[in-house]
Image: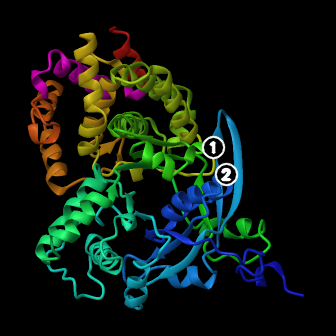
Amino acid sequence: MLTKSEIKLNRKNVELQQKPPIKILQFGEGNFLRAFVGYAIQELNKKAQFNAGIAVVQPIDKGLVNMLNDQEGLYTLFMKGVKKGEEIQEVELISNIVKGVDPYTHFNDYLELAKEESLEFIISNTTEAGIAYVASDTPTMQPPSSFPAKLTVLLYERFKHFNGDANKGLTIIPCELINYNADTLKDIIQKYIADWDLGDAFKSWLLNHCSFHNTLVDRIVPGYPKDDIEAYNKQLDYKDNLIVSAEAFFLWVIEGDDALKTKLPFHKTNLDVKIVKNMQPYRTRKVRILNGAHTTMVPFSLLYGNTTVKQSVDNAFTGEFINKAVFDEIIDTLDMDKAELNGFAEEVFDRFRNPFIVHNLSSIALNSISKFKVRVLPSLLGFIHKNNKIPTHLTFAFAALLRFYKGTWQGQTLPVNDSEEIVKTFNNIWDSNNYSEITKKSLSIEDYWGEDLTQVAGLTDEIATALELIDTKGIEEGFKAFSNQY
């Protein structure tokens, strides 16, 4: 008799031999798409009788398609997290991938996907660098190198095969983490149409009968849990080489209209999928609250002595600081429903407390200057503009950022990770022993902040004061002294 570790994961062994028709073509077979889109479509199939199969295309030369095909598209998703203070764990066998294609070894199989009668959607996640124009790509390459060029070839094949049938246009939903991802993708495809002289009829079919939808995706996916794989395997009745772990939180914001809501009936599921006319407020919400909280806490919390996000929010002092920065200062600057913002922020803090995910502050410290400019500075300046006063926590966090870039703290090297030019600039700035001079030089660099921040009334003096308090009293006592000014 076979042991559990010897039972191969395939459709026969788990009694899932019936496959749904291919309704979705997915570019990317990595951890995120399998834990995000794969799970979302599984929920649609279960709750809304969506009956959608996914054909996966491997977007780069080396990938997981062979492993995926070896398990007949099956894999196990472990979801772990915290909701309203309660730890939750869920396990789901994902079964909607019906085919995997490697266009680098089976290009004709790739082109055949364009001819699928039931195909309706293209979904992708080819990393932020994936949606890019590569001038050297040509329509005769098998395949072209870039994702947009591969997609152009496939769409053109579909257009030709169905003779420009208006009903065979596709709904294209990229999930790459760049703003206006679908708009960017559409622009690049049109450039290839022009470069390759594919004709006005094809361009018209693309623009009038295919739809492109900008998105925001949000789920932390650590991926294959190699360090704890035996504990995961013990929970299964089969051997799975493609286990993927993810947090419980799930958010998918898609720009679209009522027609898209009909095509994708997520309202029949419990998933937080928002199909909205404009996703930018949701992007701003995420960038300012979730990413902003990360960037706010990193230098401040590292200087205090924490090493992880969970430690930062669990600690009485640093946890209260981060909480007040978000709920009292960042949310105050956002023009959205306050109850919805507070609810989102509470979910964010649940995610930060997730005991199943170790999120090191040092790993978030990369490029902290540019991150602060995008994620935190708009909240800080927005608070000043709205309330005509300095936000205590965000201003102190700004000072902690500048102190962090000195590079050392109490005899220890700090995990500063930025461009050589930025690191060198702050090394030179910190040669001074004058906190006012250090602050003026730092805040006046328009390339870093988008403006000369010494022109913001009162900000230079407050940060100079905070810097001196950090150096003379430490983070906790320094902040107490700083906040007592107000």
Total labels drawn? 2
Q: Which residues are magenta?
A: 453-475
**Residue positioned 71% across, 51% down in the render:** 89
Q: x, y percentage for residue 475?
A: 40, 28
Q: Which mark is residue 10?
A: none
The answer to whether mark 2 and mark 1 are in CB contact below 8 A is yes
Left or right: 367, with 191 as reference point: right
Q: Which residue is mark 1?
A: 270
Residue 459 colored magenta? yes
Could you say which is closer to the camera, residue 448 or residue 168?
168
Amino acid, disc 2 = Lys
Asked if residue 289 lies in the magenta stretch, the reply is no
Q: In the depicted view, which residue is nearer to us: 301 or 338?
A: 338
Above/below status of 18 relative to 121: below
Q: Specify few, some or many for label 1: CA neighbours under 10 Å numbering under 14, 14-19, or 20 or more.
A: few
The residue indicated by pointer 2 is 47
C-alpha separation, residue under disc 2 versus residue under disc 1: 9 Å
Q: Is residue 455 above or below residue 411?
A: above
Tell me what residue is drawn at x 15 percent, y 80 percent.
Answer: 136
Q: Is residue 467 above or below residue 430?
A: above
Location of residue 316 in the rendering, given as x and y in whole percent from the top left corner: 56, 27
- Choose top left, top right, bottom left or bottom right for residue 105: bottom left
Q: The residue tagged with tag 1: helix, strand or loop?
A: loop
On the rendered image, what quadrant is the N terminus found in?
bottom right
Q: Amino acid at mark 1?
A: Asn
